Image (cartoon, rainbow, N blue to C red):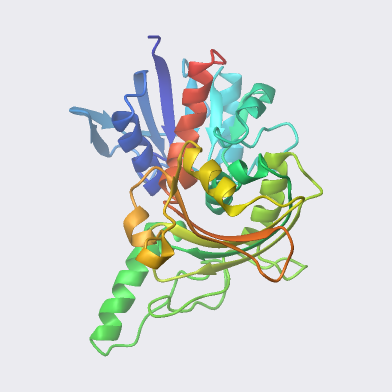
Amino acid sequence: MKKYNVAILGATGAVGQEFLKLIEERDFPYAELRLLASSRSAGSEIEFMGKKHIVQEATADSFKDIDIALFAGGSVSRDFAPHAVKAGAVVIDNSSTFRMDPDVPLVVPEVNPEAILKHKGIIANPNCSTIIMVMALKPIYDLARIKRIVVSTYQAVSGAGKEGIDELTNQVSDYCAGREMQANILPTTSMDRHYPIAFNLIPQIDVFLDNLYSKEEMKMVNETRKIFDDYEMRITATTVRVPVYRSHSESVNIELEKDVDLETIRRAIAQFPGVQLQDEPTAQVYPMPLYTSDKNDVYVGRLRRDESCDNAVNLWVVGDQIRKGAALNTLQIAETMIKNGWL
């Protein structure tokens, strides 16, 4: 099998570290692995598969002879993606920078792999919450077009990075010791006011827009339409940060164009690649973030009719947002290109 030169931009962060785990787990066919990061992390060592790799500072010249560039995310994507493409690499980017660019495909390989063929050097990885939702919706959409989606998310603190995880840990410790909890990260570091997440819920992820929805909520709306190539689909979202370390949960209500019986929907979900059906409510079997963390699949349960609306269904969806919601989906895009000879 042909092997490829791979660069990871943001190799020292949570998503970059997950890339490395998955490359090893999935026996990804790499020849050279080039680890890149900011000047702050440059020079550090990462041991990977028995070999020590020196993290290099990312520059415009970092992508020479690279076939695949996996970008972990962040504002650096806009700076370095053009240089990587000019050097001949295909960039698979986990940031929001290019997602809504009409010239950049937005891809979940199980849902719209054919969109990869439209790339001009850059392929965008969707938002983590969007990926988790569309994985559950695709098998249903194939049975009957989805007219409307109402989604509420319950998103883990790791979505805010290592700092979010650390802050939750410190706040729990402070609360239990009777100390005042310190909040510096959530809902978002750029805001003037921050709230504790321990023993709390924060109904804001990212900044609010003029329509009073948050950027995270509008990402789910706009990205879902683009992935399904269905711009008439009506979608509304509410995104909430919860005191969970890892794995996002979503309550999703969908209205279909025609009636589909629940058992047909269950079978379709159970047979869809990358999705696990956990739907035995009377036996208390349903997805929970504690048990889906570090798992590759998306889990679906609590399937039931919406008795207030014709042709409508409720479902509960849970998935690890660092794996399928970020690093795994990015790597699967590369694997899909290799498998189909598109690289």
Identity of the residue drawn at 67% across and 68% down: 208
Is residue 63 visible in the rendered structure shown here? no
Q: Quadrant of the C terminus?
A: top right
Against 67, residue 100 (above or below) is below
Q: Where is residue 266 in the image (x, y as percent from the top left)?
A: 53, 49
**What is the residue that sits farthest to the left in this orientation?**
50
Observer-nearest of 232 and 130: 232
Against 53, residue 185 (above or below) is below
Q: In which quarter of the image is the N terminus?
A: top left
Identity of the residue drawn at 27% across and 39% down: 44
Q: Where is residue 56 in the image (x, y as percent from the top left)?
A: 36, 32
Q: Where is residue 331 in the image (x, y as percent from the top left)?
A: 45, 32
Against 258, residue 274 (above or below) is above
Identity of the residue drawn at 60% across and 28% down: 113
Q: Where is residue 215 in the image (x, y as percent from the top left)?
A: 65, 60
Identity of the residue drawn at 42% across and 16% down: 4
Is residue 318 visible in the rendered structure shown here? yes
Rendering quarter of residue 142: top right
